[in-house]
């Protein structure tokens, strides 16, 4: 309670201090009156001593602490001449400041490699898309697949060394990958990659991708409403997306279980999945004036079909001799309720303080019907039938204040989420247990983060940021509607963060640290005992504790080259483990558990020059961990380096032709308690042609041209080792016809308050 009172008092004091600050502001534009984002704005004394500084925002505007008498203001940006302005202590609005192109500097840079397309600014690696070759590649997901450090694999994005990122478009979090496919690359201004998010983000977030689109007030579906008393604007937008997806998987799986006897299962698996769903978005924004905007977004989802057919043939040996042969057929039918999600937001400004409030409500559910039969050549056949109804409810909110303070900016606020999940497992056979489980989860957080420009010398400017986040997480566990005190948990953690960035000549550097967490999914916390086969059972673990991660990162950028590296020290890492079942040692129970510590590091270097019509980008790197377990009476070390890389190519040809050729690679190595024993690489090709003044684009492409996407690994447990040699039918040919109406990207500015809880569901 003392921690909460301290943070509350601190936030109030900082808010009062910020509110008392008297600031001056202005806007920086280029020779064509276009906004200049991320320009350096520095207030100095007459003898050039640093007084205060900041950078312009995405609209080219800036705010700074009180102007000093007889001071000077210096505005600078790469490729433009420095602009000097006199200041007086009474100034509050400097108006528009226009920069002049520096022809000498521009020519010097153009000869070597063109103006930098990738640079470090603040907490992010920024890649410019507007007026670059990336604007021609197709959709936003195609652009992200060519950003240094990001790999696109089917409908998934991965950041090297950080895992799957959160993606934002103009401050609104992306909930469905189809949103990226619907955003045209021509509409993107820049992409910001944050590999070590600060205190404003949930402590579970490993990386953030922020997409900023071009501003064009003349485009977009909407209705403008104007009042004779004051100016107002309302915007309405609706989108609908239908998908029908099929996938096929073939795998050879070997299970070796060494107990009193040596058991060997050789399994051949074929899995056929179909997923057809209809999702839509209805949103409305209302602007009272530029300082007060509200909006609401409603996202219903309806599943037409979700089926999973699994066929397994198994040959079983005991001590090298034939024991049995099984054939398992299983049909999983998913009966989904209609899903509902509502997000509402308010963006406001009172004096110099900006306010950002978001609230989320989510309701969804489904029932999985499992009908399976296991035929045995030597023993009894088994019929496996079960129902697994799941219901989720979520209410979440996040409030953030931002205000200038002491020459920089402070952000502070709080976040809360309340979740109810009911997960029942009803078994209609004697081989699995029935359970009725409910978890009521509550998470409360408070955060504060401060950043400002600092001078390191007369020629070197930098920016530092420090933050702290406090989180209280607790859940109550119920079995058959009765509270289970021993499985109800509470956690209190403090997560500090800090970053420092600077530019020395043409080299940009950033170092950062943050403490993070990763909470177990609700499925990992379940009590239900599920039947896999007569030698394998699976359950959850209500006693799991969250991961605690210390994350250190370093980034450097020089012209068209980038380097990044990181180190993570993970405590209480959650991974699946297997132990023999008491009384039936030949039966293995798969169950998640915490491991004490897994240190790991990663490094990557990228190069992306522009050579005429060709824009290649080559990224290569590796990850390495230090970890060992006791398996089958020996110590197994998981410390082999895993290499990775990508080679993306864009050819912007005459007459609006564009060719994309991308290659991604993952090599052999260790991750967690598994060893990936085969290289996996994927080649994607596409050809695009634009018509009607680029309003119509036609794309023909093929993904995984050589069908080399593999999932081959060995996992080691207490007495069990599982080897899986699998391939996916991931090769596909696609044809896209995209016509750009004036309706372009969503202008919705909500940012979702409960995304981490939704992911746990």
Image (cartoon, rainbow, N blue to C red):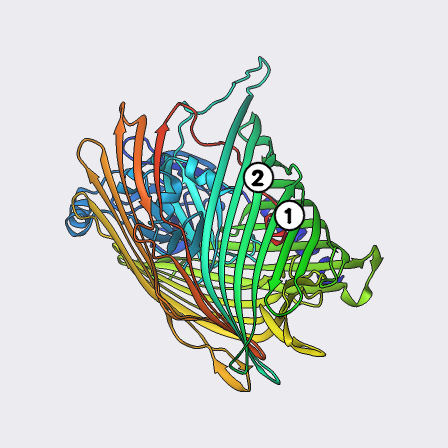
Give above or below for 33 relative to 661: above
Residue 305 disc label: 2
Q: Quadrant of residue 444?
A: bottom right
Image check: 577 left or right of 475?
left
Locate the N terminus and report the quarter of the image it occupies: bottom right
Q: Where is residue 674 in the image (x, y as percent from the top left)?
A: 48, 71
Q: Are marks 1 and 2 in contact (CB under 8 Å)?
A: no
Q: Name the residue under label 1.
A: 16
Question: Is residue 140 in view from this perspective?
Answer: yes
Label 2 element class: strand
Q: Which residue is drawn at 80% across and 59% down?
A: 479
Residue 617 disc label: none
Q: Where is residue 44 in the image (x, y as percent from the top left)?
A: 38, 51
Circle 1 residues within 10 Å: few <14, some 14–19, many ≥20: few
Give above or below for 341 relative to 317: above
Instruction: First in sequence, mark 1 or 2: give its number.
Output: 1
Label 1 element class: helix
Extreme-bottom residue of the structure: 633
Q: Where is residue 74 in the image (x, y as percent from the top left)?
A: 34, 46
Query: 523 or 511, which lies in front?
Result: 523
Question: Is residue 170 in view from this perspective?
Answer: no
Give above or below for 472 relative to 701: below
Q: Quadrant of residue 455?
A: bottom left
């Amino acid at each position: 309670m003392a921690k909460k009172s301290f943070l509350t008092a601190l936030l109030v004091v900082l808010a009062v201090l910020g509110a008392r600050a008297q600031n001056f502001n202005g806007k920086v534009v280029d020779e064509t009156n276009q906004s200049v984002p991320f320009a350096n704005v520095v207030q100095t004394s007459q003898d050039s001593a640093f007084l205060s500084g900041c950078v312009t925002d995405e609209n080219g505007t800036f705010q700074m602490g009180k102007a000093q008498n007889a001071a000077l203001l210096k505005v600078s940006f790469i490729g433009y001449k420095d602009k000097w302005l006199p200041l007086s202590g009474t100034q509050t609005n400097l108006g528009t400041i226009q920069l002049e192109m520096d022809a000498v500097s521009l020519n010097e840079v153009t000869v070597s490699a063109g103006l930098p397309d990738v640079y470090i600014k603040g907490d992010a690696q920024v890649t410019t898309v507007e007026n670059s070759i990336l604007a021609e590649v197709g959709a936003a997901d195609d652009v992200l697949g060519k950003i240094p450090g990001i790999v696109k694999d089917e409908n998934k994005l991965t950041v090297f060394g950080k895992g799957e990122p959160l993606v934002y478009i103009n401050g609104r979090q992306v909930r469905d990958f189809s949103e990226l496919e619907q955003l045209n690359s021509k509409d993107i201004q820049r992409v910001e990659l944050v590999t070590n998010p600060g205190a404003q983000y949930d402590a579970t977030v490993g990386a953030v991708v922020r997409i900023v689109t071009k501003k064009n007030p003349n485009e977009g579906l909407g209705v403008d409403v104007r009042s004779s008393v004051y100016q107002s604007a309302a915007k309405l937008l609706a989108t609908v997306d239908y998908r029908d997806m099929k996938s096929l998987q073939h795998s050879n799986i070997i299970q070796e279980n060494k107990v009193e006897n040596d058991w060997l299962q050789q399994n051949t698996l074929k899995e056929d999945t179909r997923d057809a769903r209809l999702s839509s978005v209805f949103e409305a924004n209302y602007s009272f004036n530029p300082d007060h905007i509200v909006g609401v977004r409603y996202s219903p989802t309806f599943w037409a079909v979700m089926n999973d057919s699994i066929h397994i043939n198994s040959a079983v040996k005991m001590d090298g001799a034939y024991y049995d042969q099984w054939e398992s057929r299983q049909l999983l039918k998913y009966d989904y309720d209609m899903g509902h999600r509502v997000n509402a937001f308010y963006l406001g400004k009172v004096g110099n303080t900006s306010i950002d409030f978001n609230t989320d409500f989510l309701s969804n559910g489904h029932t999985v019907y499992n009908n399976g039969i296991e035929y045995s050549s030597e023993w009894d056949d088994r019929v496996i039938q079960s129902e697994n109804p799941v219901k989720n409810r979520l209410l979440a909110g996040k409030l953030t204040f931002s205000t200038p303070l002491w020459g920089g900016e402070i952000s502070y606020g709080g976040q809360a989420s309340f979740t109810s999940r009911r997960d029942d497992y009803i078994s209609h056979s004697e081989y699995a247990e029935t359970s009725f489980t409910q978890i009521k989860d509550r998470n409360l957080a408070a955060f504060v983060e401060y950043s400002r420009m600092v001078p390191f010398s007369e020629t070197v400017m930098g920016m530092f940021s420090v933050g702290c986040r406090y989180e209280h997480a607790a859940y109550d566990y119920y079995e058959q509607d009765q509270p289970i005190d021993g499985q109800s948990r509470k956690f209190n953690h403090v997560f500090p963060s800090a970053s420092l960035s600077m530019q020395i000549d043409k080299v940009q550097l950033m170092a950062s640290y943050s403490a993070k967490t990763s909470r177990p999914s609700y499925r990992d916390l379940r009590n239900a005992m599920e039947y896999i086969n007569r030698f394998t059972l699976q359950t959850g673990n209500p006693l799991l504790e969250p991961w605690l991660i210390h994350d250190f990162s370093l980034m450097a950028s020089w012209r068209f080259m980038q380097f990044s590296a990181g180190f993570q020290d993970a405590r209480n890492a959650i991974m699946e483990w297997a132990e023999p079942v008491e009384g039936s040692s030949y039966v293995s129970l798969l169950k998640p558990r915490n491991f004490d510590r897994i240190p790991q590091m990663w490094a990557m270097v990228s190069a992306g020059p522009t050579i005429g019509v060709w824009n290649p980008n080559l990224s290569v790197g590796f990850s390495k961990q230090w970890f060992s377990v006791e398996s089958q009476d020996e110590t197994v070390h998981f410390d082999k380096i895993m290499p990775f890389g990508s080679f993306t190519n864009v050819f912007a040809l005459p007459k609006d032709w564009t060719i994309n050729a991308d290659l991604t690679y993952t090599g052999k190595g260790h991750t967690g308690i598994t060893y990936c024993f085969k290289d996996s690489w994927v080649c994607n090709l596409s050809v695009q042609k634009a018509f009607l003044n680029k309003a119509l684009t036609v794309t023909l492409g093929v993904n995984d041209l050589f069908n080399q996407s593999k999932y081959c690994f060995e996992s080691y447990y207490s007495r069990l080792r599982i080897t899986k040699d699998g391939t996916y039918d991931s090769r596909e040919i696609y044809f896209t016809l995209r016509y750009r109406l004036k309706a372009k990207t969503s202008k919705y500015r909500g940012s979702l308050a409960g995304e981490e809880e939704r992911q746990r569901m």
